[in-house]
Image (cartoon, rainbow, N blue to C red):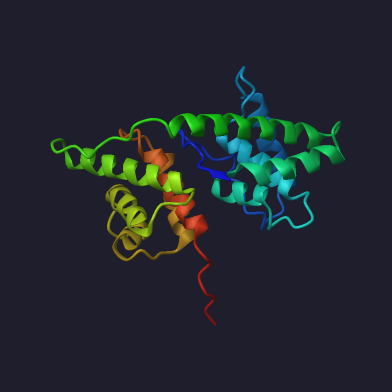
Amino acid sequence: MEFPRPTPEHERLPPGDIDLTGVVDQDDSLRTAIDEALAQTPDDGIVPDWGARSLARALANQQPDRHDSALHHFAVTGRIAWEPMMRELATLYAEAPEEERGEWATHLGSYITDHLERAEDTNNEPVDEIPLGGTALERVSAYLRIAIHEADARGEVIEVEDAKAIATLLAALLGPSSEMAIFAETGNGDADRLRAECRQLRQQPHDTAELPPWTSRLEQYLAAQPPAPRTS
């Protein structure tokens, strides 16, 4: 069973914007990110989102197939598949309970359990209706909250039209020549450039509390799409 990852209002990337796909070997950078995440862990013992994804990447790298596991999927997309992830963590912990790997598996297991409980609570909350009055931004924001809630209920990423709606809002901050503007118009664009623009927006001051969740949802959508065909 897959549960949506609750998206915080303010989300940061791992220090140094490390690669979470496992394509690049960055063991030292991952360990640095994990150490910082554990140092910032609050009293409840739950690591921040970016720390959990760094843990998942480091642990997935220690599996026989580092690119075909629930831990890899979570590291890349931020979406929790609770049952397979917990099975994989149990295996990793059993192999090295007293070592660094066992500690990492314990921290990530606590994170997953906490977010499972929060997801169950969220599913029981009412969803906003689209307001008849209010500004255009308020109406679009309400529409996107409903679209995101429905995607979470299905255990899927948002639909392409919802991704384009988010891109339309973000493109207004980036300009008409941005990759975001191209995606907003066509539903197609360079995924690496789009992710870079999402990072750029998160690093800038803004007045809209929903901007970080929007960029996160758009990145989840991009991560779930098949890679573009190679051109000769």
Q: Residue at x 43, y 56 (%)?
A: 194
Asked whether 32 or 62 is in front, the reply is: 62
Residue 202 placed where, x, y %? 42, 40
Q: Residue at x 34, y 32 (%)?
A: 126
Residue 40 placed where, x, y %? 61, 25
Residue 83 placed where, x, y %? 65, 43
Q: Quadrant of residue 206?
A: top left
- As drawn, the residue found furthest toward the top would be 43
- As drawn, the residue found furthest toward the bottom would be 232
Q: Residue at x 72, y 39 (%)?
A: 31
The quarter of the image holding the C terminus is bottom right
**Is residue 111 rendered to the left or right of residue 166?**
right
The quarter of the image holding the N terminus is top right
Residue 221 placed where, x, y %? 45, 54
Q: Quadrant of residue 39?
A: top right
Asked whether 90 or 72 is in front, the reply is: 90
Q: Residue at x 54, y 76 (%)?
A: 230
The reply to whether residue 228 is in sight is: yes
Q: How many marks?
A: 0
**Is residue 93 rendered to the left or right of residue 6?**
right
The reply to whether residue 28 is in sight is: no
Asked whether 194 or 204 is in front, the reply is: 194
- Vertically, is 21 above or below 33? below
Asked whether 114 or 136 is in front, the reply is: 114
